[in-house]
Image (cartoon, rainbow, N blue to C red):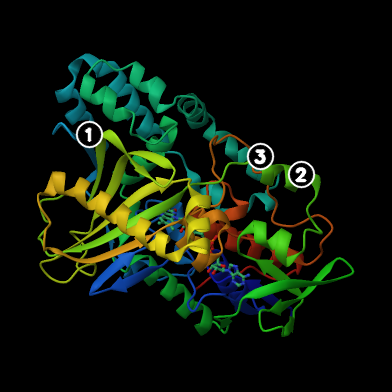
């Protein structure tokens, strides 16, 4: 029986490990941190349970093909999901509010009440979002590495939706807003995801209620996967950082751990950051020109500053997800920020003690080096800057919620340095590489040329990244290995 060693017990590593165990391989996962899950995690502070990752879990209902993929490993019917009525509320400092209702018909009604003069454009946006939402994504579950002629032929049925996607992929929020007459609608559209196609994907998933929030949180999902993995006979080693991949005759044959012990295996999967995998664990020996080009040209995905606040107020009247848009930007690190995104966990009874509320404020940042270098060189100043970010966020929030003086019981701040420290993701990127253009081919392969018995999984080999993508990449690698080793690919009964 082939022995598979998996580096990294994040979502991709757990997924690969589970599928391979089910398919009759003996696997061991080596995870650097004290618990698995990687970025798919959460933590508790002072009675509050902070979710560190998921907002929407794509495939949360049977109406989406990913549900069946998750269900191959997870007991999906036992997980409770919350579908929010409002996808987002934009709050401007002058008191104006703009609501994105999750239900597309309700949203259209709201928009038409707001601006009859933009009727044609509103209908175009809503109708096209609905049409894109009807796209049958089931073909995406099969690894593209295993596509045959029939798979390409069956993709032809996507052509009508593809035309729409191409159209909206070219439209940025700025160009779209220029076509709008109504001032509130025009300025609000600028805060949609860009290109508008990205917004449409998320909105159609919310409309169809296929991207709910799991009440067990991100950590709950990781724990379930960990439980399944060990139940199916997998061995998970935590606090087991891998320092080197042992290679003999251009074949991966084992791992050297941080304590200098060696472990031998027949197949090695790295489900961690690609940068450290190829430059550190493999000492740069298998970086061909194509990979080097991809890694130098592609933009990293963003990281986050996350401020979590435990507040002794009742938040039932506050929307779950809102954006406070500032008239004057605030300076944080070396960046200027024009808005903050707030999640209020008011329907999730696990998040905060009864009668109290958890607010998670996220600020998108690409100031990776500033935070990572600051933490490495001056811990006192790093702590001071984290406190400064928390104070900025609290004062912005108070403009909307009123004084929180004496009501804040818990403050927790994470920075790109936190993600880097706990998960080793390069520069603290939370989703690997950016995917600016959906129609750009993926330059990453799940195997390195000239290195035998070695595979890559995780969000770093699937630009755009994210929870379903990382999970699927682990599944893909398991399926590719099964095909190569002539074993049947098996899923949970
Ligand atoms: C704040 C935040 C919000 C997010 N929101 C969303 C969202 O709403 N939707 C969405 O789809 N995605 C979201 N994501 C992204 C998503 O969490 C990631 O894309 C996904 O979890 C990545 O999984 P992975 O297994 O590829 O990588 P990771 O989670 O990074 O797992 C890699 C694992 O490898 C371990 N490791 C690294 N180096 C070594 C080594 N040398 N030896 C041993 N172990 C090692 C790490 O400790 C880690 O556990 C979010 C992430 C964050 C942080």
Query: In terms of secondary structure, where does tag 3 sit?
Result: helix
Quarter of the N terminus within the rendering: bottom right
Instruction: Residue at 65%, 57% (x, y): give it.
Output: 274
Distance CA(mark 2)–CA(mark 1): 45 Å
Residue wearing tag 2: 290
Indicate left or right for 41 with 452 as reference.
left
Distance CA(mark 2)–CA(mark 3): 11 Å
Q: Which of 188 and 131 lies nearest the eye of the viewer?
A: 188
Q: Do the residues labelled 2 and 1 touch (CB within 8 Å)?
A: no
**Label annotation for residue 107:** 1
- Count of marks overlaid on the render: 3
Query: In terms of secondary structure, where does tag 1 sit?
Result: helix
Residue wearing tag 3: 297
Tag nearer the camera, 3 or 1: 3
Give percent across and percent down for residue 107. 22, 34
Indicate left or right for 308 with 95 as reference.
right
Quadrant assignment, res 99: top left
Instruction: Residue at 58%, 34% (x, y): give it.
Output: 439
Q: Which of 264 and 258 lies nearest the eye of the viewer?
A: 258
Indicate left or right for 95 with 426 as reference.
left
């Amino acid at each position: 029986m082939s022995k598979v060693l998996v580096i990294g017990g994040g979502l991709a590593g757990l997924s690969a490990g589970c599928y391979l165990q089910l398919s009759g391989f003996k696997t061991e996962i080596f995870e650097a941190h004290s618990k698995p899950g990687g970025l798919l995690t959460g933590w508790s502070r002072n009675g509050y349970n902070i979710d560190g990752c998921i907002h929407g879990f794509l495939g949360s209902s049977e109406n989406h093909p990913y549900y069946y993929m998750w269900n191959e490993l997870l007991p999906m019917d036992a997980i409770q999901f919350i579908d929010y009525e409002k996808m987002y509320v934009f709050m401007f400092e002058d008191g104006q509010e703009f609501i994105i209702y999750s239900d597309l018909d309700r949203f259209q009604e709201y928009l038409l009440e707001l601006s009859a003069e933009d009727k044609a454009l509103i209908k175009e946006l809503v109708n096209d979002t609905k049409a894109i939402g009807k796209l049958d994504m089931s073909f995406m579950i099969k690894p593209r590495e295993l596509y045959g002629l029939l798979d390409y032929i069956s993709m032809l049925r996507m052509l009508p939706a593809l035309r729409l996607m191409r159209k909206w992929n070219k439209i940025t929020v700025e160009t779209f807003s220029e076509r709008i007459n109504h001032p509130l609608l025009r300025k609000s559209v600028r805060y949609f995801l860009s290109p508008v196609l990205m917004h449409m994907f998320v909105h159609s998933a919310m409309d169809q209620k296929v991207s709910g929030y799991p009440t067990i949180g991100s950590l709950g999902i990781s724990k379930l996967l960990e439980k399944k993995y060990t139940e199916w006979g997998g061995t998970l080693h935590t606090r087991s950082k891998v320092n080197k991949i042992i290679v003999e005759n251009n074949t991966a044959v084992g791992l050297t751990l941080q304590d200098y012990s060696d472990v031998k295996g027949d197949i090695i999967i790295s489900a961690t950051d690609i940068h450290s995998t190829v430059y550190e664990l493999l000492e740069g020996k298998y970086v061909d020109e194509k990979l080097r080009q991809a890694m130098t040209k592609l933009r990293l995905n963003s990281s986050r500053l996350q401020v979590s606040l435990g507040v002794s107020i009742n938040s039932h009247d506050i929307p779950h997800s809102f954006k406070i848009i500032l008239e004057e930007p605030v300076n944080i690190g070396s960046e200027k920020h024009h808005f903050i995104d707030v999640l209020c966990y008011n329907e999730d009874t696990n998040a905060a003690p009864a009668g109290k509320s958890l607010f998670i404020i996220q600020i998108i940042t690409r100031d990776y080096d500033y935070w990572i270098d600051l933490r490495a060189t001056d811990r006192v100043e790093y702590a001071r800057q984290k406190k400064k970010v928390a104070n900025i966020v609290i004062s912005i929030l108070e403009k909307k919620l009123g004084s929180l003086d004496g009501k804040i019981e818990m403050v927790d701040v994470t920075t790109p340095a936190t993600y880097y420290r706990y998960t080793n993701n390069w520069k603290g990127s939370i989703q690997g590489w950016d995917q600016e253009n959906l129609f750009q081919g993926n330059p990453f392969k799940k195997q390195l040329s000239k290195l035998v018995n070695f595979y890559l999984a995780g969000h770093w080999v699937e630009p755009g990244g994210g929870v379903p993508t990382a999970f699927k990449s682990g599944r893909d690698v398991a399926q590719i290995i099964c095909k190569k080793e002539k074993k049947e690919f098996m899923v949970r009964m």
